[in-house]
Amino acid sequence: MSAPSTATLKRAVPRFGRAPKVTKNLRKNSRTLLPQPHVPVVIGDIAPCRVMDHYYTTLQDDLMYMTYKHETTPRPTREIRLTFDPSDPYTKNRYNPPVGGSQIGKKPAPPVTPENVAILERIQIHTMIKEAIGSRQTLLPAIMAIRALTGETYKGGGRHTSEGIQIVRAKKSVGGWIRPGVPVGIKVDLKGPAMYDFLGTLVDFVLPRLRDFPGVVLPPQSSSVNSPSAVSGVVSFGLPPAAMGFFPQIEVNLDSYPKSYGMHIHFVTNATGLGAQNRARALLSGFQVPFVRK
Amino acid sequence: MATEAAIDTPVASSSAPAPAKRRVRSNLTASVILNRSPIITREPTPFETAYYDYQARIRRALHNPFPYEFYFKQGSLLEARFNIEETQRERNSFGDEFVGQSGSTEVKEEDKKAAEQLSQQEGEGEVIMPREHPADVSGDVKSLDRAAERNLYLLVRAKQDGKDIWRFPQGGVEKGELLHQAAQRDLFAECGAHMDAWIVGRKPVGVLKSQSNSTPSEGDEKFTFFFKGHIMAGQVRPQEKTISDFCWLTKQEIQPRVDDHYWQNVKDMLSDH
């Protein structure tokens, strides 16, 4: 940018810092009598995000260089052979799956390009509360704590995809324990800057203060590379209830919560194919999440 | 300890007095683009600042009610301080008239004083470190603290064909040696072991083909393979007699120092940030 245009920008911009003068009042909602904007208001970012910047300035390049595989020849295409001859009238309309079964866990990773470098898509936080099976009101303090932790609300910031804290209900009936539809826990999905802020808090404030936590334990070398978890590009680990008190959002008034809750954290990345979980781990270790071998 | 060991090994091999026995592949060179990542966040542009201000004001106007009684005891000092600060934030966002309209309660003088004292105890009045380092002011290009919000790259001045040129640290590749190992060894051989450096991956990030103009033939082609590296700690101490100087530069500062052919081949490996 040339110097004169910067100067004009600097002069022109500060009027956005203050609210403009109201020239025409908004229409009032007839039911609530509250002013109603004539467009759906969606709130964008309100501050630069340090951890996200780190990804785009440093981590993305490094991950691309580390995971790049040089392929000189085009990949062989897989000939898909169907179980029954599709031209045979006898097998017409019959379920006709390809021979070879499920390809999950066998598909090679897509070629590394600048567009598909491993990136964090969302973080899911999940807590199971056993007492909720008996009395569902025990979910409330946990909801309050996770809300304080993440700041997520239902359609928060006008984003229709933001589902806020969701209640997890039992799917199966387990004799003498749970029935389908009974609330058993809560979960929340984090995306965008909120996700990176949570990751930054976790890495800077929580993990260093955990007792006897050398890092996320890696599976043994002998573990399968074709298992669904190994090829899904998701890294998961759990935090003990003691960890909740280390989050600054909870720490300020820890006494207000009846108890601490542990949580499972799932880091969902875009990595797919063989070795996806390893690429997801490489991404997370770039954010300084420690990993150790047993 | 592990990093120390990693640093010591290449020095031992470079100082070992057996260069005569080594068979160097004359047409291959390994080079390291040593990078110092940004150490502070980028300053937002005026447009970004305006956008953030605007969005923050909408958010402030539309946020859910704040549960005061959950976070503060009634009449506590912390609550008083929060109210004072919140009023100030409202005033900054929406102007004096709005704060006057909303009928905010008058703050007691003793509350104000106590809140000020509290914030001083917590060290709020302390001066924040400036974004500009003294190295930026003095124009010291050897300092690793300069241009804190940019990516910096190490450039060394070396004697080549009788004249001084600026280039990235580089060196020869021995027979049977892997390229990334050669790159690391050459980096420490030229720049000393007093730094904690890490070569990213085993694959080169780029290649530079050069050919002597006088006799263009197949065997004359020379290849320089570039590897990306990161410096974590320490500083460069030029080791060889051929290296007379070094500097840490941003992408834009590198262009005038290197020749055009070199620049055209390396510019896309460097970050604009």
Image (cartoon, coloured by chain):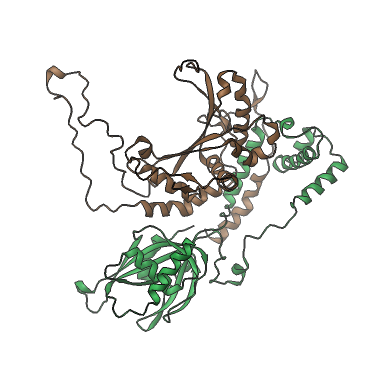
Chain colours: A brown, B green
Q: Quadrant of residue B159?
A: bottom left
Residue B170 location (% of width, % of height): 38, 71
Q: Is residue B168 visible?
A: no
Residue at (37, 50) in percent of width and height = A114
- Tally of numbered discs: 0
Residue at (64, 32) in percent of width and height = B62
Q: Is residue A41 above or below residue A55?
A: above
Residue A180 location (% of width, % of height): 47, 16
Residue at (68, 30) in percent of width and height = B65
Position of residue A30 in the picture relative to residue A62 (left or right): right
A255 or A153, nearer to the observer: A255
Q: Quadrant of residue A91?
A: top left
Residue farthest toward the bottom in the current orientation of the protein: B162
Residue at (43, 71) in percent of width and height = B188
A277 or A72, nearer to the observer: A277
Position of residue B221 in the picture relative to residue B117 (left or right): left
Residue B40 location (% of width, % of height): 57, 56
A196 or B47, nearer to the observer: A196
Q: Is residue A136 above or below residue B90?
A: above
Q: Is residue B59 visible?
A: yes
Q: Is residue A246 above or below residue A57?
A: above
Residue A96 location (% of width, % of height): 20, 23
A278 or B91, nearer to the observer: A278
